[in-house]
Image (cartoon, coloured by chain):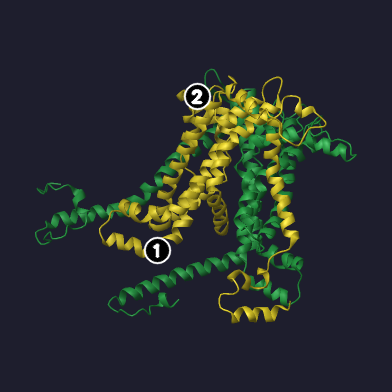
């Protein structure tokens, strides 16, 4: 019971106490209060998903039923099918548009950000510092400031309604450049670049052989973030895309625009459109988490 | 270029082939290679950053300037050009009662979402900062809402906050409380919309704050514990003050995002107009309505610039506050950065000078 002899006992027996048990004062395991709070937080984070499944698996009357059951009904598949087959929604087209536009945007942002980040972090050139400040400053410019002329521009080109109109403006990102600059600055020792130079590698070859491999962890996180935000983006796609050729968020918005809104179908559609990202999260969530945590230290 | 050497210039970049005799090399080719690699060194940085800047000029800078131009015009959609009318569009927007309602709503929703969100995020981060089991599981758990599209979140919550059959109201009436008119009452609708924002972003901010918390030296807590400070005392005396720079970062980013809110209020009801009495009309929603509902691009552009100026003003205020609050730390950081770089340079020079010296006791290794 007395902690001191216990600690001594652990010291005396080799490998008896695990490393975790020998941590300092704050390292002791927290009590029920912490776990209870975390369970509540997690419940709040997951409940809306369950709720949409609950309503989405019922029928139009479920939502008005005062004695609604907390167990899901059996209509989810049927509701999902009616979302998928709704001619006003174009679900499959929206899914495909979302997948390829988000993937293209993520790939492009990762490549160009790594390239620019490499230049800002590791190459010396006149005005580099100021240009980087400029890049960071552009992050504060709201999307709304450009939408009117961009719309006119794309209308002139005949591109309104085309997914290209949402891909082109998103091909690079100021945040990405800043993120890669921060990362590459500390990830690559200057000696490595000098060594490559001495070996006679061209500037671009140095980037390919030294910069790109070193950037991989940060690039993976940037790619994930870009993909998620491109996937969820709504304002600009909603303005520029046709209802016949939408992305998923735009298609979702159409579910609610009927005169009579059947919430069981709407929420089945919500869940259906969220499943791809949930799958992505299951496989890449750890990266996303550590990405947010890594970004914050430098921010 | 008159050189008779016909080897492609790229060959000069390649490392010398093993076994190839270096002696018969044409001196001019070396000079060309030198010049090439000097140009390579000088130009490539600009080449590498150019994709960002070119695209930014086309889809960022040009539209911003063009928005300014359009905002002084009466834009004709048919001719696709405008006639100059000065500040009339700005005057029009600023004299609309709807604009001021939208401004009020935007700030109300922004405050209702950012303040509880930050408070909750700090406390959840403090929980996660304990030596809990299954750390990654909890961290991932709080982030799940972040992957859901705001549109999807809005559809779920607008259903839960339904006036007649919503979950929240049925719970309230079960508890014997009067139901709240989440859609017709302005303030209630702001709370509902802020809840959607909080749902999606609290976990994200929690992780940012958690990262900052983990950077706090554990010795501080040990010292405080020895001095007899309780957990709560430690939290308010050590954790919260150490988080200040990160908090400011989070506040600035959430301000920029919060003032542009569109998705959630747009999807809050099926009409997407911000309510019958503009109860939850936000500035961006108003901008969309002017631009693509009424098809008046001049007014929409003027409103876009007004929004930008508001964000800019708040950004400047934020910056001033930031400088005041974290100035000391920033200076210390900058100085130490410079010192570190100077030390590194000195060490490198030292290393070069003693290139033949094989001892490991270089200043860098010593550190």
Q: Mark 1 to mark 2: distance in Å?
A: 48 Å
- In the image, residue B227 lies at what x, y percent? 74, 77
Tell which of A26 and A130 is nearer to you: A26
Residue A290 as seen in the image, left or right of residue A28: left
Q: Residues within 10 Å of mark 1 (few under 14, many from 20)?
A: few
Q: Is residue A219 visible?
A: yes
Relative vertical location of residue B19 with respect to residue B190 in this rendering, above or below: below
Residue at x 47%, y 23% (from the top left corner)? A158
Q: Residues within 10 Å of mark 2 (few under 14, many from 20)?
A: some
- In the image, residue B179 lies at what x, y percent? 86, 35
Q: Drawn colour of chain B?
A: green
Q: Is residue B72 visible?
A: no
Q: Drawn colour of chain A?
A: yellow
- In the image, residue A214 lies at what x, y percent? 41, 56
Mark 1 or 2 closer to N-term? 2
Tag 1 secondary structure: loop
Circle 2 marks a residue in which chain? Answer: A
In which quadrant of the rendered view does residue B348 lie? bottom left
Q: Which mark is residue A155?
A: 2
Tell which of B24 and B328 is nearer to you: B24
Residue B62 as seen in the image, left or right of residue A83: left
Residue at x 81%, y 31% (from the top left corner)? B163
Q: Which mark is residue A215?
A: none
Task: Answer yes or no: are tags 1 and 2 on the same subunit.
Answer: yes
Tag 2 secondary structure: helix
Tell which of B57 and A10 is nearer to you: A10
- In the image, residue B148 lies at what x, y percent? 62, 40
Relative vertical location of residue B119 with respect to residue B106 in this rendering, above or below: below
The residue labelled by disc 1 is A189
Residue A81 as seen in the image, left or right of residue B280: left
Circle 1 marks a residue in which chain? Answer: A
């Amino acid at each position: 019971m007395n902690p001191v002899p216990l600690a001594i006992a652990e010291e005396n027996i080799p490998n008896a106490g695990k490393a975790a048990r020998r941590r300092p004062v704050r390292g002791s395991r927290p009590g029920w209060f912490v776990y209870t709070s975390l369970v509540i937080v997690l419940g709040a984070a997951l409940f809306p998903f369950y709720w949409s499944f609950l309503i989405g698996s019922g029928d139009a009357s479920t939502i008005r039923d005062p004695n609604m059951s907390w167990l899901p009904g059996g209509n989810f598949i049927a509701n999902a099918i009616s979302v998928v087959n709704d001619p006003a929604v174009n679900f499959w087209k929206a899914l495909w548009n979302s997948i390829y536009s988000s993937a293209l945007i993520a790939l492009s942002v990762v490549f160009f950000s790594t390239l620019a980040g490499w230049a800002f972090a590791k190459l010396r050139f006149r005005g580099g510092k100021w240009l980087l400040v400029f890049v960071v400053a552009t992050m504060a410019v709201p999307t709304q400031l450009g939408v009117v002329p961009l719309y006119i521009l794309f209308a002139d080109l005949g591109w309104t309604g085309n997914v290209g109109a949402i891909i082109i403006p998103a091909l690079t990102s100021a945040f990405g450049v800043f993120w890669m600059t921060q990362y590459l600055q500390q990830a690559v020792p200057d000696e490595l670049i000098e060594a490559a130079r001495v070996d006679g590698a061209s500037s671009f070859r140095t980037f390919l052989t030294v910069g790109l491999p070193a950037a991989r962890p940060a690039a993976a996180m940037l790619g994930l973030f870009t993909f998620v935000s491109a996937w969820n983006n709504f304002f600009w796609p909603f303005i520029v895309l046709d209802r016949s050729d939408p992305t998923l968020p735009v298609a979702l918005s159409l579910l609610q625009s009927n005169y009579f809104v059947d919430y069981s179908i709407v929420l089945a559609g919500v869940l259906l459109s969220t499943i791809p990202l949930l799958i992505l999260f299951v496989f890449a969530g750890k990266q996303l988490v550590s990405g947010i945590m890594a970004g914050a230290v430098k921010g | 270029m008159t050189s008779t050497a016909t080897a492609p210039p790229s060959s000069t970049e390649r490392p010398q082939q093993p076994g190839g005799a270096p002696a018969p090399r044409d001196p001019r080719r070396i000079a060309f290679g030198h010049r090439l690699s000097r140009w390579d060194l000088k130009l490539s940085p600009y080449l590498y950053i150019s994709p960002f800047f070119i695209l930014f000029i086309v889809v960022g800078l040009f539209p911003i300037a063009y928005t300014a131009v359009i905002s002084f015009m009466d834009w004709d959609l048919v001719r696709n050009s405008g006639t100059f009318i000065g500040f009339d569009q700005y005057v029009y927007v600023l004299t609309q009662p709807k604009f001021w309602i939208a401004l009020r709503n935007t700030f109300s929703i922004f405050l209702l979402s950012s303040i509880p969100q930050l408070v909750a995020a700090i406390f959840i981060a403090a929980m996660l900062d304990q030596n809990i089991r299954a750390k990654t599981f909890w961290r991932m758990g709080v982030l799940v809402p972040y992957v859901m599209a705001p549109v999807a979140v809005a559809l779920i919550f607008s259903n839960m906050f339904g006036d007649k059959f919503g979950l929240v109201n049925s719970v309230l009436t079960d508890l014997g409380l009067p139901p709240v008119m989440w859609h017709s009452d302005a303030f209630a609708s702001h709370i509902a919309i802020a809840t959607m924002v909080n749902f999606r972003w609290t976990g994200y901010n929690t992780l940012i704050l958690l990262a900052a918390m983990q950077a706090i030296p554990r010795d501080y807590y040990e010292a405080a514990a020895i001095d007899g400070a309780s957990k709560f005392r430690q939290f308010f005396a050590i954790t919260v003050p150490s988080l200040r720079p990160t908090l400011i970062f989070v506040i600035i980013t959430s301000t920029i995002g919060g003032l542009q809110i569109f998705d959630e209020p747009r999807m809050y009801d099926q009409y997407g107009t911000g309510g019958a009495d503009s109860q939850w009309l936000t500035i961006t929603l108003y901008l969309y309505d002017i631009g693509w509902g009424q098809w008046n691009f001049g007014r929409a552009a003027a409103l876009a610039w007004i929004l930008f100026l508001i964000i800019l003003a708040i950004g400047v205020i934020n910056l001033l506050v930031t400088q005041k609050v974290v100035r000391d730390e920033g200076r210390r950081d900058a100085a130490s950065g410079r010192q570190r770089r100077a030390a590194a340079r000195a060490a490198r020079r030292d290393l070069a000078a003693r290139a033949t010296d094989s001892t490991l006791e270089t200043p860098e290794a010593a550190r």
